[in-house]
């Protein structure tokens, strides 16, 4: 997609040609075998399909212009941004588009997510999301937004959209929403991390880029322990920490410490990175610090998803009854979101309210799309005996250690708020 869009300067042409190439592959490869370089075969076939389409649909004069573009155009210099996919993300994140349109279009064109997957991330209907993507492509064509290579000077105006896109690609990979996909889509998480590393190389002094990268690698460090051998989601508290990737954890902690040492007020991605650093610091999560960090994040982004994550953390720190009160307040905004019902079910279960917990588990299972998560929720629902928490769900409050990560995270500044944000890691796992 990125190569075709750069060459033909038209997203619809690129999308249609890519689809034609994959259809040709589905027809020829089973009989003739997979070629030695499948990617090159697809790109070459898609380019030929696009040229054929241009020839069929263009007038004589337009055909000459397109032929000059296809055959005679000089290659553009790579400049500061020499990665095709990152360039296409920056093109799709043009400031002329609304933030929602930038994110949705880029997830579709670059991230390879289906309309259904994107709609789930934005908590909207499939038809609504499909129309939004179509309008975004039409606006690019109508406004004559150039398909030139963005320069380093373009990065600041487009960065918030790019970060939101990478965040959602990573989340879709880490907890895939489709029932017919693997529970964890490593190709998406790896690509999101790769692009985040490129951004960090381009903008080494940007705190939010560093925070995004740290959040991703600290989360990805837990991936080997996330799904059991039977295909069931493993809650963070039950994961084998010996299987976590220590190299990634060390790298992520170093990035977080670097941002703390800068003295700059943290943005939302830096706070999310700090939360993940607390989760991976020591033998157990210090929920006192997690709540303190969420208190700061809520001041930057008071969306219901962030408040749900904070409520879950409060339930871990102060007890299930306290957390349940906060979660119930979010029912009008999150009743269609599976993680709301899953979090509520867990707290009801801890409180011994088994019938209500079972009802909440049923709601969560009905709304969830990830098969590993559904397996986990189903098993929890079918366990009739409440877990051995004290009545009221009180938990031990540990003191804050001065060498942890939230001590220097006071203050804040404006940050992008995207309606598509997914619940934080501990919310999904707990």
Image (tube, rainbow, N blue to C red):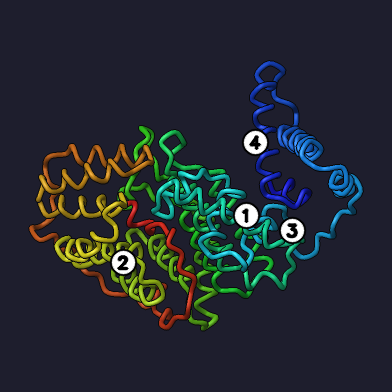
Please name the residue shown 58% across and 56% down the image: 136
On residue 19, the disc is 4
| Nearer-the-camera pick, 25 or 273 | 25
Tell me the mark number nearer the camera, choosing from 4 and 1: 1
Residue 429, horizontal then vertical, whole percent: 33, 51
CA gap, disc 1 and disc 2: 35 Å
Location of mark 2 (residue)? 307
| Nearer-the-camera pick, 54 or 78 | 54
Tell me the mark number nearer the camera, choosing from 2 and 3: 3
Residue 21, horizontal then vertical, whole percent: 69, 33
Location of mark 3 (residue)? 147
Q: Quadrant of residue 374?
A: top left
CA gap, disc 3 and disc 1: 14 Å
Tell me the mark number nearer the camera, choosing from 4 and 2: 4
Which of disc 1 and disc 3 is earlier in sequence?
1
Please name the residue shown 77% across and 61% down the image: 148
| Badge 4: residue crowd in 10 Å (few <14, some 14–19, many ≥20) | some
Which of disc 2 and disc 1 is earlier in sequence?
1
């Amino acid at each position: 997609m990125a190569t075709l869009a750069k060459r033909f300067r038209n997203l619809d042409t690129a999308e249609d040609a890519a689809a034609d190439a994959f259809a040709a592959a589905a027809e020829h490869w089973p009989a003739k075998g997979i070629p030695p370089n499948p990617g090159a075969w697809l790109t070459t076939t898609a380019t030929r399909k696009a040229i054929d389409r241009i020839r069929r649909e263009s007038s004589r004069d337009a055909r000459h212009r397109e032929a000059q573009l296809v055959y005679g155009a000089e290659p553009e210099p790579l400049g500061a941004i020499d990665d095709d996919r990152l360039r296409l993300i920056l093109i799709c994140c043009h400031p002329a588009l609304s933030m929602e349109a930038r994110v949705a279009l880029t997830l579709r064109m670059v991230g390879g997510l289906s309309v259904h997957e994107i709609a789930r991330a934005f908590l909207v209907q499939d038809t609504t999301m499909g129309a939004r993507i179509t309008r975004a492509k039409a606006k690019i064509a109508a406004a004559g937004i150039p398909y030139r290579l963005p320069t380093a000077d373009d990065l600041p105006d487009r960065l918030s959209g790019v970060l939101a896109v990478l965040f959602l690609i990573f989340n879709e990979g880490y907890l895939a929403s489709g029932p017919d996909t693997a529970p964890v889509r490593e190709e998406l998480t790896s690509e999101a991390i790769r692009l985040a590393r490129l951004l960090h190389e381009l903008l080494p002094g940007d705190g939010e880029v560093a925070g995004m990268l740290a959040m991703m690698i600290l989360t990805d460090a837990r991936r080997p322990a996330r799904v059991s051998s039977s295909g069931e989601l493993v809650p963070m508290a039950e994961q084998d920490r010996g299987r976590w990737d220590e190299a990634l954890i060390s790298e992520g902690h170093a990035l977080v410490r670097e941002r703390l040492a800068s003295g700059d007020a943290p943005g939302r991605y830096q706070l999310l990175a700090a939360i993940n650093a607390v989760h991976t610091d020591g033998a157990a999560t210090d929920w006192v610090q997690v709540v303190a960090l969420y208190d700061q994040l809520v001041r930057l982004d008071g969306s219901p998803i962030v408040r749900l994550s904070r409520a879950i953390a409060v339930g871990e720190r102060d007890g299930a009854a306290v957390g349940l009160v906060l979660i119930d307040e979010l029912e009008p905004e999150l009743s269609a979101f599976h993680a709301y019902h899953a979090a509520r079910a867990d707290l009801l279960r801890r409180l011994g309210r088994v019938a209500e917990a079972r009802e909440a588990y049923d709601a969560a299972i009905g709304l969830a799309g990830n098969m590993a998560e559904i397996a986990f929720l189903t098993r929890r629902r079918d366990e009739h005996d409440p877990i051995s928490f004290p009545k009221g769900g009180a938990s031990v409050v540990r003191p804050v250690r001065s060498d942890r990560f939230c001590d220097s995270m006071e203050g804040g500044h404006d940050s992008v708020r995207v309606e598509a944000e997914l619940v934080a890691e501990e919310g999904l796992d707990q």
